[in-house]
Amino acid sequence: MDSRWAKVRIEALNLLKNEQRLQQIVRLIGPDALPDSERLVLTAAEMIKNGFLQQNAFDDIDVYSVPEKQIQILLLIMDFYTKSLAVIKQGAPLLKIMQLPVREEIIRIKTSVPNDKLEMINDVKSHLEQQLGELERTYHKVAVV
């Protein structure tokens, strides 16, 4: 088993626990009352549920995933969360992050990347770096000015 699995699994579980706590607040006062950093928790938890935990037994690719693919997907979702949080702390609005095409790419990995072509996940990683990097550069300039 991949040595990264235990760590990323704990991080994902903690994020899902945090999401449960935030959902109680959302039910009472709505999501708009939450700061972007906490709404990002809701977004990342949704990505974990839809892009990692949920499985489609009728999809030829998603019917079975090798453990390495599962690890890479979860690592990528948590990487998305961590890097997005850093960009939000620089002043980028969550809306800009939600509009990034890579978010949907990450969710679709389970159905678009076959078990024998895991190198395709590296393309999604590159898109993540590129798209969040552009946001980071934009809002870093704004923060410096």
Image: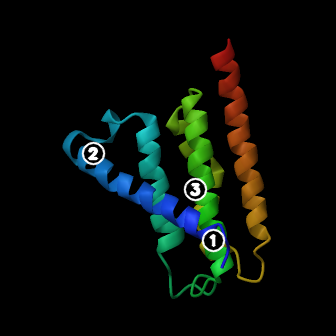
The residue under label 3 is 78
Residue 26 marker: 2
Taking the image as shown, residue 67 lies to the left or right of residue 33, namely right
Amino acid under disc 2: Val
Which label's residue is closer to the chain start, 3 or 2?
2
Closer mark to the observer between disc 1 and disc 2: 1
Taking the image as shown, residue 58 lies to the left or right of residue 42, namely right
Q: Quick check: marks 3 and 1 in contact, CB under 8 Å?
A: no
Q: Which residue lies furthest to the left in this view?
A: 28
Which label's residue is closer to the chain start, 3 or 1?
1
Residue density around tag 1, few if under 14, some if 14–19, many if 20 or more, within 10 Å: some
Q: Can residue 113 be seen in this view?
A: yes
Residue 71 marker: 1
Q: Is residue 8 above or below residue 85?
A: below
Which part of the image, by quadrant, shows the C terminus? top right
Position of residue 144 measured from the top left corner of the image (x, y, whole percent): 68, 15
Q: SS at mark 2? A: helix
Closest to the observer, 70 or 139:
70
Q: Identify the residue at horizontal 52%, vertical 32% (top origin).
A: 93
Which part of the image, by quadrant, shows the N terminus? bottom right
